[in-house]
Amino acid sequence: MPKLSPDQVKLPDCPPHVCMEMYSQARYLSGAREMVAGIAKRYGFDDNEASRIALAVDEAISNVIRHCYHRCPDGPIRIRIWPHSQTLDSDAKGIIVAIEDEGPQIDPDSIRGRDLDDVRPGGLGVFIMREVMDGVRFERRTDLGDRGMRVIMCRAARAPQDEDEAKR
Amino acid sequence: MMEVQIERRDGLVLVAPSGDIDLSCSRDLQQSMRQALDGKPERVVVDLSRVPYMDSSGVATLVEAMQIARKQSTRLILCGLQDKVRSIFEIARLDRVFTIARSLEEANTA
């Protein structure tokens, strides 16, 4: 599956099938991971893929806790999940996840993963999100005035033969 | 909850965390790694066989430890990586940067 550009990653125009809200506290990361992995399996992903998707969501939430709320424990974070259907045939399965905060807005183009040749602590989260998912889009929310960012990530479930080809 | 055991013997320090390592506890691991590297031991082995999950905050902690180890000529070896943990090292292409042994025995003799 080729990677999607941010412009190809859209927020669905229907209500999410699952919505979870949490405070910006890292102790809730494990619960969020379990929820996402469990739903991903229902959408057609195997154990390994489901845990990779949960890792991408973990990285997105961790980034919000650290860089948006600077580890303050009372920042709201919302995780919304849809089954993936856009640009896919009716039998296709996959997942769309949006993680939303209510912090200061920043230029979405300024959010970049680091160059992997530069081996140093930190800066891996965005790279992992982009590596694991088919498409990742950062955007400013428009429903909270001048506050709030959103990251939308999508991943189509692979047919077994696609997985074999992807590994080659 | 993650816990870390540290054991020292004959120039070798064994660090054995247990539990998921994410943003909620990576600072505890950071502290343990700094403690393990203190005194410039010949070799530090990190046994990850009881770590079912790690995110990039845990990986960053190990990258920092590796950089300290290189500066002071300590050999840092990871071992016992479970599939999900190995996966994040592979995604981040760090499986080529770290010395990774299959087992504790191999790490002790590598």
Image: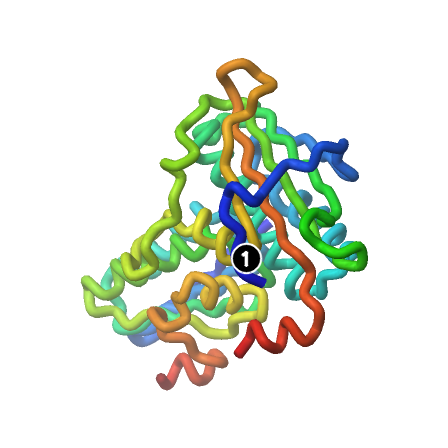
Quadrant of the drawing holding the N terminus of chain A = bottom right
Q: Is residue A57 left or right of residue B76?
A: right
Residue A6: % across, % down? 50, 43
Q: Quadrant of residue A92?
A: bottom right
The residue tagged 1 is A132
Residue nearest the viewer, comparing B94 with A84: A84
Residue B72: % across, % down? 19, 64
Specify whether residue A105 is in view: yes
Residue A43: % across, % down? 77, 55
Residue at (36, 70) in percent of width and height = B98
Secondary structure state at the residue bearing disc 1 = helix
The figure's colour scheme reads rainbow
Q: Is residue B53 left or right of residue A71?
A: right
Q: Is residue A95 above or below residue B71?
A: above
Q: Residue furthest top?
A: A145
Residue B49: % across, % down? 55, 70
Q: Quadrant of residue A164?
A: bottom right
Q: Is residue B8 above or below residue A120?
A: below
Q: How many callouts does the rendering have?
A: 1
Residue nearest the viewer, comparing B66 with A166: A166
